[in-house]
Each structure stands twice: as C-alpha cells, then as structure tokens.
C-alpha cells in the first residue's frame, strides 16, 4: 500500500499545477520519496470527469484543498515527530500521534479513494470480476446485495468518516467496515474499496440528501483498482 | 426583525398535527390513559427559529440556515422520535438487547436535537443588541478573569474549534461547583455528543460540522469561525451563565413534558 502513497504518480492530469521538486528525491526500493515527504498525488482523470455522479467543483476542492491540507499537515507533524524522536522526547511523540493518525490517515484514505474512482468512459461502474467478485458473492450473495449493505453502513456513520470494503488478512474474506474521521485502514484489515462519507465529499451537490450521493457513486467506482488490492 | 423574536417559551411547542394536540387541554387525568399508555414514548419536535432564515446574513447564508434547520435538525428530531418509539416497544416486550442496541441512536439524535436547539438560541442577527458582548456583563467579567481579555478568549476558542478532527462542536461551558461555581472552560465534543456532564452548563456552542458552513465557506472554515462572533447571542449566553435560561429547557421538553409543566 505504501508504495502507492508516496510515489510521484506517472499519471498526470492537465489541471495539476504544482509538482514536488526533483532535487530532493531519493529512490528506495522502487519508491520515490521526497525526503520522506508526502505529496499530493495526481488524479488519473479530470476534475469534471466523474460528473454527474460527483461534480467537478467538489472534485477540485476535495483534491486541491482538502487532500492538499492533509498532505501539508502530515508533513508538518511528521517533522515535529522526527524532532521529538531526535530529542528523545517521548511525551511529545505520544502527543503527536493523533495528529499523525488524522492527517496521515486523511492522506492515505484520499489517495486510495481517488484510485478507486474512475469515469464511466474509463471503466467506472463496471462490475468486479474474478476472485474479488467471487469473494463479494460469497459474503453478500450478489453485487447489488453488497451495495445495499455498503450504503446502509455509509448512512449509519454518525459524524465524519469512511466506509470500506476490507479484506481480513487472517481469513482472506471480505467485509464492510466503517471508520471514524480519518482513521486509516491499517493492521489486520487491507483496504479494498473506500467511500468518503464526510460532508465535504458531497455537500455542494447533494446537500443533506446524502443517500443520493451514496447511490450515485457506484456509477464511478473503479472495480479494477479494487481487484488489484485484493489478494 | 428583533421585535418579532418569539422568546416566550411556549412558542417552542409547535405541536405536531396529530391527536397529541389534545395535550393543550392540560387535562392529564383524561388524556394520560389514552395518550400515554405503557408503550408510548415522548415526541420531540423541531423548535422554530427565533429569527428568519436570512437573519444571520452575511455571516451565515440563508441557504445554510434553511437546510440546517429544516433538513438536518428535523432529521435528528425524526430519528430521535423513531428510536424512542422502538425503545418504548422494547421496554414493553422486555427486550433488553434491543434496548441496548438503541442507546447509541438515542444519544446521537438526542444530542443533535439538544445541540442545535441550544445553537439556534445562542445566535442573533448581526448588529442587534443581543450580538454585542456588552449584553453579557457578568459573563464577560468572568471571561476576562479567565483568559485575560475577550480577544484572548476568542483566540483560544478559535484554536479549539479548528482543532476538531472530524465533526463536532465547540462550547463555552460553565463547569464549576461550590465556591468555584462560575468557572468557565472551552470544550470540544465529537459528532453530536451533548454537553450533559455533571454540573456542566453550556453557555454557547458553535457547530463545526461541515454542513454548518460548507455551502458558503467551503474548505475555509477559519473564516466561518472568525465570522461567527458577529452573530453570537450574548444576551442568551448571559442568561445561561446566570442560570436563568428556562427558555432553553422549555425548548427541549417533549410534548409529553409539556403536560408536566
Ligand atoms: Fe474527503
Ligand atoms: Fe424553541
Ligand atoms: Fe449542525
């Protein structure tokens, strides 16, 4: 998972303006780091490409503002963490952990989210195939049955958060889990497919009608990306 | 606009159009067996705003106010009533599992109802006398004693609000007891957790859910937090600080509660 997060994406979108400076890059095992700094990944589609499911305005703010802020804040707190480690200040390290979890989680979650979306022209909405399709059918009976359960999970989030299709690394089976705020999918579970249920993800277009957003987003789900994550 | 404030507590009770309207006869002897049998549960309702949807412009847009009150707050009320009804049925049938499973829905939706009811009343049109901190002499004295001056208090409040990770609220709360009964503190709460700790009195709250500002401020929540100071109702804040905010309590009573008033 980490290799997808800190890399400099080869997929460049025309709308992107800022790219990290090449001067400070070091390559470790095929992964490009910018002195360990996180960077905003490019989208592999234009901001308007997910319309009408998700408006271009939402995509632009969500990617260039919200996600960028998580990246910036994660880098800031990571520097502070490095400093606290250098000083062997354990209290400071512990105090910084929620900030790393929140902003690092925001970066990780959004990066995975952009990848598991695609315009319909690029396969968005096409149902999963192969092993993932089988795992979903085994657990939920059918894709429609799965979507219904997933949307129920999304609707049940009290506050900000995400719903994920995850794979249990112990049993190999898939299940739906919700996470509060920007808590990332780490540890026992592997993220397969995530949907952002924060209000900023839909409010400009759907206002308080979030069920409509949850219904529409399946038209632009990139199941191919999800299949690649499934092991 | 200000003269139109329906500040009378009873105006909080726009009873739903149903048979429950008979509670207005205030005759519990006749009504109770019919209306409030063992399986009944209280019904809460959306309190009307004490000002128009456009009254907080330009700091909070009309569109935000309308969606926030008639959409979001109404949904908390509806979901609370539904959860309480299911809970009452589960009590009736001795179904303890269902009762427990409903606790979180009750807390979330009742919290949403309480928080928003307090929030609407601690806001006031910009430029009104209520929106001036001079309307809260006792509270301001305590704020100055606690934070140094109003400016420092606002900075501390802003820092707290902007530090919320996810959805939540920021509150100025009176937390003291005994000789220290006027002690103030700034707290943040997650999602719709209400301020119901022992001895805690909410003075005013600011909704930091994205729905509270997004249509107008988008990702610029710092500007929302900056502008909210133009529409804080210091008169209501003073009343809550002095412990004389019966209006708030009346707003939060269910229609069943009205019978007992
Ligand atoms: Fe988001
Ligand atoms: Fe009211
Ligand atoms: Fe709200």
Image (cartoon, coloured by chain):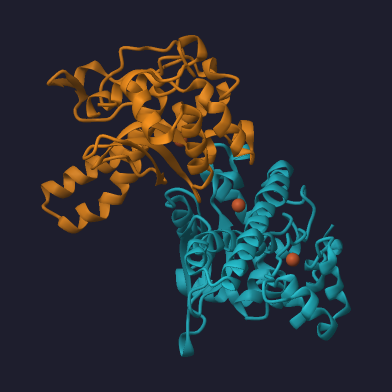
Q: Quadrant of residue A14?
A: top left
Q: Quadrant of residue A116?
A: top left
- Image position of B18 with respect to B26: above or below: above
Q: How many marks?
A: 0
Of residues B146 and A133, the one nearer the viewer is A133
The spot of residue B141 in percent (x, y) is 56, 76
Q: What is the quadrant of the C terminus of chain A in the image?
A: top left
The spot of residue B233 in percent (x, y) is 68, 63
Q: Residue at x 15, y 55 (%)?
A: A89
Q: Residue at x 37, y 12 (%)?
A: A12
Q: Residue furthest bottom?
A: B179
Residue B219 visible? The answer is: no
- Image position of B86 with respect to A182: above or below: below
Which chain is drawn using orange?
A: A
Which chain is drawn using cyan?
A: B
Q: Quadrant of residue B41?
A: bottom right
Of residues A66 and B235, the one nearer the viewer is A66
Of residues A8 and A193, the one nearer the viewer is A193
Q: What is the quadrant of the N terminus of chain A in the image?
A: top left
Residue B131 visible? The answer is: yes
Q: Residue at x 46, y 50 (%)?
A: B162
Horizontal side of A222 relative to B99 (left or right) equals left
- Image position of B116 with respect to A155: above or below: below
Horizontal side of A29 relative to A110 (left or right) equals left
The spot of residue B152 in percent (x, y) is 47, 62
Of residues A178 and B169, the one nearer the viewer is A178
- Image position of B225 with respect to B86: above or below: above
Q: Residue furthest right?
A: B25
Horizontal side of A31 relative to A52 (left or right) equals left
The spot of residue A43 in percent (x, y) is 41, 18
């Amino acid at each position: 998972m980490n290799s997808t997060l800190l890399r400099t994406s080869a997929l460049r979108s025309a709308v992107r303006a800022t790219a990290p400076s090449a001067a400070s890059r070091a390559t470790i095992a095929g992964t490009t780091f910018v002195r360990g700094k996180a960077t905003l990944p490019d989208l592999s589609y234009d901001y308007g490409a997910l319309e009408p499911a998700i408006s271009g305005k939402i995509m632009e703010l969500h990617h260039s503002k919200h996600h960028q802020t998580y990246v910036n804040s994660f880098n800031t707190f990571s520097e502070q963490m490095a400093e606290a480690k250098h000083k062997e200040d354990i209290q400071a390290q512990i105090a910084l952990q929620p900030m790393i979890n929140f902003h690092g989680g925001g970066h990780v979650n959004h990066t995975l989210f952009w990848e598991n979306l695609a315009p319909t022209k690029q396969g968005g909405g096409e149902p999963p195939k192969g092993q993932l399709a089988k795992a979903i059918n085994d657990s939920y009976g059918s894709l429609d049955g799965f979507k219904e359960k997933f949307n129920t999970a999304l609707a049940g989030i009290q506050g900000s958060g995400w719903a994920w299709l995850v794979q249990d690394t112990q049993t190999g089976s898939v299940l739906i889990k919700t996470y509060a705020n920007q808590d990332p999918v780490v540890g026992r579970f592997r993220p397969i497919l995530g949907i952002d249920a924060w209000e900023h993800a839909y409010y400009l277009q759907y206002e308080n009608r979030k069920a409509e957003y949850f219904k529409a987003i399946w038209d632009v789900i990139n199941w191919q990306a999800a299949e690649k994550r499934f092991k | 606009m200000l003269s139109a404030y329906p500040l009378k507590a009873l105006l909080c009770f726009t009873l739903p159009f149903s048979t429950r309207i008979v509670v207005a006869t205030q005759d519990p002897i006749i009504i109770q067996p019919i209306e409030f049998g063992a399986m009944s549960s209280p019904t809460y309702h959306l309190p009307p705003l004490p000002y128009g949807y456009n009254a907080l412009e330009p700091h909070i847009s009309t569109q935000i106010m309308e969606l926030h009150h008639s959409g979001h707050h109404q949904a908390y009320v509806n979901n609370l009533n539904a959860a309480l009804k299911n809970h009452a049925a589960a009590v009736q049938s001795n179904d303890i599992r269902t009762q427990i499973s409903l606790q979180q829905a009750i807390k979330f939706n009742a919290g949403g109802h309480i928080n928003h009811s307090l929030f609407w009343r601690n806001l006031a049109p910009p430029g009104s006398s209520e929106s001036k901190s001079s309307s809260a002499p006792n509270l301001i004295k305590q704020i100055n004693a606690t934070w140094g001056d109003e400016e420092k208090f606002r900075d501390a409040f802003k820092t707290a609000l902007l530090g919320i990770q996810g959805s939540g609220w920021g509150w100025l709360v009176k937390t003291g007891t005994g000789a220290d009964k006027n002690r103030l503190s700034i707290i943040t709460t997650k999602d719709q957790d209400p301020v119901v700790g022992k001895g805690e009195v909410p003075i005013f709250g600011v909704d930091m859910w994205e729905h509270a500002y997004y249509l107008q401020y988008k990702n610029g929540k710092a500007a929302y937090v900056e502008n909210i100071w133009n529409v804080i109702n210091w008169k209501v804040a003073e009343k809550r600080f002095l412990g004389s905010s019966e209006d708030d309590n009346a707003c939060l009573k269910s229609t069943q509660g009205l019978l007992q008033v």
